[in-house]
Amino acid sequence: MKDNFDIFFRRKPALMLVALRKMSKARYGSVLAKEVDCTYSHAVKILQTLEVLGLVSFKKKGRIKLIELTKKGEEISEHIDSIRRHL
């Protein structure tokens, strides 16, 4: 696996974390993909990596998976958003 540090300095993963934090409710993968302007399959790949890192969790609701930030994900997304505002 790539160095975990790399994921935070790629635009789409950072935007996903910030988008999840701003709405503060569980999201569908397709909605999140549209918000950060990427394909659904790319979003799923990123989200799977974020799940392995303990930053997001998936909750099944019927056939649909909802995505939520974990406590760790919340903290990191807050830092990313802060850095983005400073730039």
Image: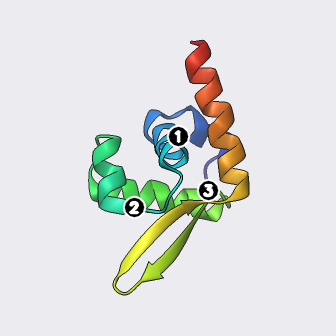
Task: Say whether residue 46 is left or right of residue 86.
Answer: left
Name the residue located 57 percent from the left edge and 32 percent from the top edge. Answer: 9
Q: Is residue 1 above or below residue 85?
A: below
Query: Which residue does the image show at 50% across and 58% down from the upper left?
Result: 25
Q: Position of residue 59 (x, y in %)?
A: 51, 76
> Left or right: where does residue 17 sit relative to residue 64?
right
- Residue under numbered circle 1: 18
Residue, far top: 87
State the residue position of label 2.
44
Helix or strand or loop: what does disc 3 sit on? loop
Name the N-terminal-most of marks 1 and 3. 3
Q: Secondary structure at mark 2?
A: helix
Q: Residue furthest front?
A: 24
Question: Mark 3, mark 2: which one is toward the viewer?
Answer: 2
Screen quadrant of the C terminus: top right
**Amino acid residing under circle 1:** Val
User: Which residue is pictured at 72% across the width and 44% down the height?
Assistant: 75
Residue extending farthest to the bottom is: 62
Displayed quadrant of residue 68: bottom right
Query: Which residue bears the numbered disc 3?
Result: 1
User: Please, what secondary structure does the residue beneath circle 1 have?
Assistant: helix
Q: Amino acid at mark 3?
A: Met
